[in-house]
Amino acid sequence: MATEVVATPRVLADEGSLLSASESSPCSKVRLTEGGTAVVVVRALGGVAAQLNAIPVASKRTQNRIGYFNTSLTIVTYEGIRMPCSVQLVSGHVHIRRNGHIGLIVLDHPERHNAISTEMWQGLLNAATELAEDTEIRAVLLQGEGERAFAAGADISEFNDKRTDSSANQEYDNVSDRAYNALLTMPKPLVAMIHGYCIGGGLAVALTADLRIAADDASFTIPAARLGLGYRASGLGRLVDLVGPSATKRILFLADRFGADEALTMGLVNRVVPKSELSQATDDWLNKICDNAPLTIRAAKAATDEWTKPSDLQNFDEINELVNACFDSTDYQEGVAAFMAKRKPRFTGR
């Protein structure tokens, strides 16, 4: 996920001095460092990254590692510094964070309300795979960075490049489908914390979660009918399972925005809380999940998910093996001992 930042301050200053960009510039400030490298603090107008042009003379590449993902930043230097700064479009990131037994998957593209780019779909796949395999993680949280959105759907700015026709769209679908399936088949409880915009592909990501807690400012929509694009039958299955065919048609036919209370009524979310209480309410549920026996939770999730499959695809032999593993575990012995001693159990997942 490479990002290139191109900067040309309006006025030449001494090395290390701080310059303010012009009012028309998408940048907030520009700092010149040794060698003429321009370090830019970016805030695009209207919250959308600007795309202007500049001609570099030389460039210097630096590497930065954030969590599991590698990001690359290219800083471009100039011989003459005469024009306002310009910024190339940022494609967003997906971060993994860990807090004890809780793994966090963070959609980070606030300039576009966390709209999900192709690179971010790949990041979701990588994050889901890593946390699924991490034996210390007992529950996973999905959230959007910033205060304004969980995720505002697919990044429409890519449509002219990566979704130009059905063939190009298939390549996009291959990446997004793999990410979607990795989240949907996550063996650990997956919780979505939703605030602000939750639109289209963003709602699809939220639907992969086992539980969804929404702030009272959450706003939902699937705008496919206003864009002229189609959703494949497999992509709608999860929505139909959750809210039923009638509510699904209401969402798709009207293609309008509806609030958290209506989402709760139709079963799209499990709980609605004031936005100021969203983080605490979500933490409370995650901590309760992590306090319980991990093997029991895993078997319960697998059994529930198995019942949602068509009867010819159900395999309860695997579920029975997970249940047997619960009874053969030291956690089972600990649970019974703690109950008899009237104390809180200390489960290890073994």
Image (cartoon, helix red, strand yellow):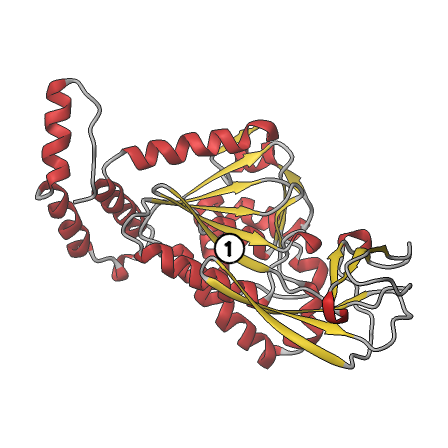
Q: Position of residue 336 (x, y in %)?
A: 11, 28
Q: Is residue 133 visible?
A: yes
Q: Looking at the rendering, in which quadrant would you find the C terminus?
A: top left
| In this rendering, position of residue 21 left or right of residue 301 | right
Q: Is residue 163 visible?
A: no
Say what amino acid the circle numbered 1 marks. His
* Above or below for 54 versus 22: below
Q: Looking at the rendering, in which quadrant would you find the N terminus?
A: bottom right
Residue appearing at x 39%, y 36% in the figure: 286
* Residue found farthest to the top: 342
- Residue with the mark numbered 1: 95
Q: Position of residue 285 (x, y in %)?
A: 40, 32
Residue appearing at x 15%, y 38% in the figure: 331
* Above or below for 323 versus 19: above
| In this rendering, position of residue 87 left or right of residue 134 | right
| In this rendering, position of residue 226 left or right of residue 243 | right
Residue 89: quarter of image: bottom right
Q: Nearer the viewer, residue 62 or 336?
A: 62
* Above or below for 184 versus 56: above
Q: Nearer the viewer, residue 254 or 175?
A: 175
Q: Position of residue 57 (x, y in %)?
A: 78, 81
Residue 309: quarter of image: bottom left
> 10 Å neighbourhood of mark 1: few (<14), some, or many (≥20)?
some
Q: Nearer the viewer, residue 294 or 310?
A: 294
Q: Secondary structure at mark 1?
A: strand
Residue 139: quarter of image: top left
* Above or below for 170 versus 107: below
Q: Position of residue 314 (x, y in %)?
A: 25, 57
